[in-house]
Image (cartoon, rainbow, N blue to C red):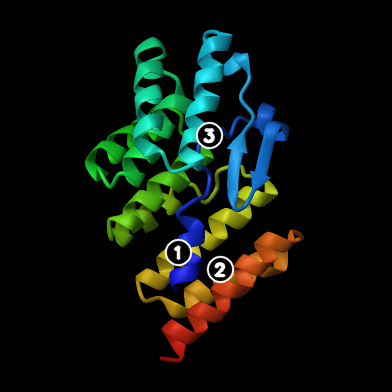
């Protein structure tokens, strides 16, 4: 399941789930970016710094990205975009305790922030705490989601079920995603995941 896991290691980075802002998302190469606006930051400068951190992250300059985010945190200690992004960067740096601190903190203060829940489950997958990943995803089963968020959710459930050895359940989530998808990238991801699960989990 190597290809599928790599895909889901890069989802929902530096994004925002505010329902009023859903139209301001940009989807590229399996990553959902949020087109930032001044309404999410105290001033234009901070918004520009956040965009700079996002570019550094996409170039895998995690240290540079972290430095900017830590400076932003000093000015905006309650900003969920900054805090959630810190959780992702620490995950990339394999500093799992720090990542969990930030990601869990954001889920507690902003329980409707869907993307952050996905990132938290991703942390638990990366640190091989699959039961916690499943518990995290179950908590948001009824959370309002966009069409693409629902597909990400289904494929993340498939990933966790695969790692827990629940082959039939994993295939069910992939099939559900395939049925619902009208997007070529999602459809290809779901079909590839289905074939990999069938081969590695069922037919081995």
Mark toward the start of the polypeptide (3 vs 2): 3
Task: Give the structural element (helix, strand or loop) at label 3.
Answer: helix
Q: Find numbered disc 2 in the image and state the secondary structure of the residue it sits on.
A: helix
Residue ID at (70%, 31%) = 24
**In the rendering, which numbered label is found on residue 192?**
none
Q: Are marks 2 and 1 in contact (CB under 8 Å)?
A: no
- Residue 55's mark? 3
Residue 31 appears left or right of 10? right
Q: CA distance from mark 2 to mark 1?
A: 15 Å
Quarter of the figure with the C terminus = bottom left
The answer to whether residue 55 is left or right of residue 183 is left
Q: Nearer the viewer, residue 125 or 4?
A: 4
Kindly identify which numbered label has been placed on residue 5. Answer: 1
Percent coordinates x, y for residue 143 in the rendering: 55, 43
Which residue is at 65% across, 31% downward? 19
Q: Earlier in the sequence, mark 2 or mark 1?
A: 1
First reached walking from the N terminus: tag 3 or tag 1: 1
Neighbourhood count class around disc 2 (C-alpha, 10 Å): few under 14, some 14–19, many 20 upward: many
Which picture quadrant has residue 83? top left
Which residue has dot 2 on it? 173
| Residue 176 quadrant | bottom right
Q: Secondary structure at mark 1?
A: helix
């Amino acid at each position: 399941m190597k290809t599928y896991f790599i895909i889901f290691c890069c989802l929902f980075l530096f994004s925002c789930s505010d329902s009023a802002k859903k139209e301001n998302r940009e989807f590229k190469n399996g990553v959902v970016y949020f087109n930032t606006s001044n309404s999410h930051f105290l001033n234009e400068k901070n918004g520009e710094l956040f965009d700079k951190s996002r570019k550094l992250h996409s170039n895998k300059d995690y240290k540079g990205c972290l430095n900017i985010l830590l400076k932003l945190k000093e000015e905006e200690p309650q900003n969920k975009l900054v805090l959630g992004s810190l959780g992702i960067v620490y995950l990339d740096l394999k500093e799992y305790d720090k990542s969990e601190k930030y990601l869990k903190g954001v889920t507690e203060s902003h329980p409707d922030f869907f993307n952050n829940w996905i990132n938290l489950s991703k942390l638990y997958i990366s640190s091989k705490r699959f039961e916690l990943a499943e518990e995290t995803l179950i908590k948001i089963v009824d959370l309002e989601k966009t069409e693409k968020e629902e597909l990400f959710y289904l494929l993340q459930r498939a990933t966790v079920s695969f790692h827990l050895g629940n082959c039939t359940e994993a295939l069910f989530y992939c099939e559900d995603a395939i049925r619902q998808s009208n997007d070529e990238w999602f459809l290809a991801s779901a079909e590839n995941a289905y074939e990999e699960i069938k081969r590695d989990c069922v037919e081995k």
